[in-house]
Image (cartoon, rainbow, N blue to C red):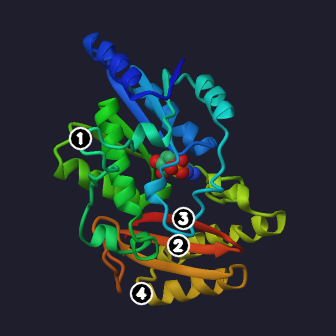
Amino acid sequence: MKTTNKIKDVKNIIKKIKNSNQTIGFVPTMGYFHDGHLELMRRAKRETDFVVVSIYVNPIQFGKGEDFDKYPRNLQRDIKLAKKVGVDLVFAPDDSEMYPKSEINGDNFSTYVEVKGNLTKTLEGKFRPGHFRGVATVVAKLFNIVEPDIAYFGQKDYQQLLVIKKMVQDLNYNIKIIDVPTCREKDGLAMSSRNKYLSQEERKKATCIYKALMHANDLIEKGERNAYNIIKEMKRIIQSDTSKIDYISIVCADTLKNLKVLKGKILVAVAVWIGKTRLIDNIVKEV
Ligand code: AMP
């Protein structure tokens, strides 16, 4: 497995891979790997010839006061894990490589990709303004650097997945986007690098998120179609264990528009604070 922090190296390697007609699978990450990340890599390994993983904590997708500085990082451990699952190339750039001062006019980086409309206004977009602009911009850059045939994203960040799919469609990227189901701990908590922030007591409380999602699932299975009733029940389960609920929403899984009555492919999405840690999770269902 090769590792580099230079765009030029990646481009040289990719050129050779393309010349030998091999397909390229790509998994963009912010590192501090858990099994969810590794599952994306395993899937890429099964479906493509050459797997590239990027590790980059992208500063422009974090808002002021968010956890950019304390976001967990452990590059050496990540490299070992990537190697173990058979990744071919790890690209771990620093900020000066990704957002250098322009050689054109000396300005800082000044081109951004913004997916407009409801997809980025709602849910995470409401609570993290500018987040998806940062995500779309860095992923657009990474796609141009890596030129993958297939890129893999987790359903855990369902809204991000839709934003990337929209960007790929709108900007005519020739890249297939694959969504990978959410990997969970034994008690249902969605794996996340941010789970590291949780104290032992908070870790126990965090299971309320999955419990609430599973309760919503049961209610829907039993025939409940009224979003308000389901959300009320979920709030009851979550409220006692959280310091704040950012949202519990039931929306159309394609447009992310709010639903009063459940119909078609739906997304039940949750963002809550367990102490000082903000966690998100969701389920997708066809009703
Ligand atoms: P991150 O490093 O958190 O930016 O995540 C990198 C990729 O891994 C994204 O596509 C995430 O959606 C995906 N991912 C994160 N957590 C999970 C999980 N528990 N299961 C599946 N995919 C995940």
- At 59% from the left edge and 74% from the top edge, which residue is drawn? 272
Amino acid type at circle 2 is Val
* Disc 2: which residue: 270
Q: Is residue 220 left or right of residue 150?
A: right
Circle number at residue 226: 4
Q: Is residue 170 left or right of residue 11?
A: left
Task: Tell me the SS state at disc 3.
Answer: strand
Residue 108 horizontal/vertical position (percent): 35, 50
- At 47% from the left edge and 76% from the top edge, which residue is drawn? 220
What's the distance in space between the residues labelled 4 and 1, CA to CA? 56 Å
What's the distance in space between the residues labelled 3 and 1, CA to CA? 42 Å
**Disc with the residue nearer the chain's start (3 vs 4):** 4
**Disc with the residue nearer the chain's start (3 vs 2):** 2
The residue closer to the viewer here, 13 or 212, is 13
Q: Are marks 3 and 2 in contact (CB under 8 Å)?
A: yes
Amino acid type at circle 4 is Asn
Q: Quadrant of the N terminus?
A: top right
